[in-house]
Amino acid sequence: MKKLNLESMSLDELWQLHEELNQMLSVRLNAEKRALEKRLAQLRRENDAAIIPATPASRQRRPYPQVHPKYRNLSAPYETWSGRGKQPKWLSAALRTGRSIDDFLISSR
């Protein structure tokens, strides 16, 4: 590529060079953009083909033993708690009032 002497060029010549460069850059950038979009679409197709959707029927849950309730709300007997996980609100509120957790124990069967 020959070296241009920009200092000796007139303003009109520089402007013409500027427009030619803009045109060349625009063509090359658009070609590069199309190539990248084509590659991205190809990668998406490959990725979609590789992903096998897991349906709920295809995965089985591990069998867990049934956990029986250990505590019962005295004011609403249908509310029970097994002693696992976060304490229910009714039990937390009762414990804040000074009651003991043993007050809510369900007698053994």
Image: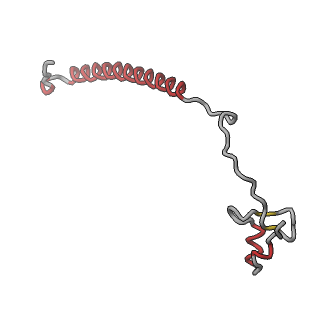
Figure check: 77 above or below 2: below
Apparent side of residue 24 relative to residue 102 in the rendered image (left or right): left
Q: Quadrant of residue 61?
A: top right
Q: Is residue 63 above or below residue 84?
A: above
- Rendered residue at 29%/21% (across/down): 19
Quadrant for the C terminus, please: bottom right
Relative depth, front residue between 84 and 14: 84
**Identity of the residue furthest to the bottom in this view:** 98
Camera-nearest residue between 64 and 10: 64
Q: Seen in the image, is 94 located left or right of residue 86?
A: right
In the foreground, 12 or 63: 63
> Furthest residue to the front?
109
Image coordinates for residue 18, horizontal then vertical, percent? 26, 23
From the top left corner, tell me how far across and down residue 2 is, in percent. 13, 18
Q: Nearer the viewer, residue 48 or 99?
A: 99
Tell me what residue is drawn at x 54 percent, y 24 percent: 49
* Residue at image point 74% right, 65% down: 88
The answer to which image quadrant residue 85 occupies is bottom right
Q: How many marks?
A: 0
Can you tell which quarter of the image residue 59 is in?
A: top right
Position of the N terminus, as image quadrant, is: top left
Q: Position of residue 35 (x, y in %)?
A: 40, 20
Relative to residue 49, is residue 81 drawn left or right?
Answer: right
Residue 80 locus on image (x, y percent): 80, 63
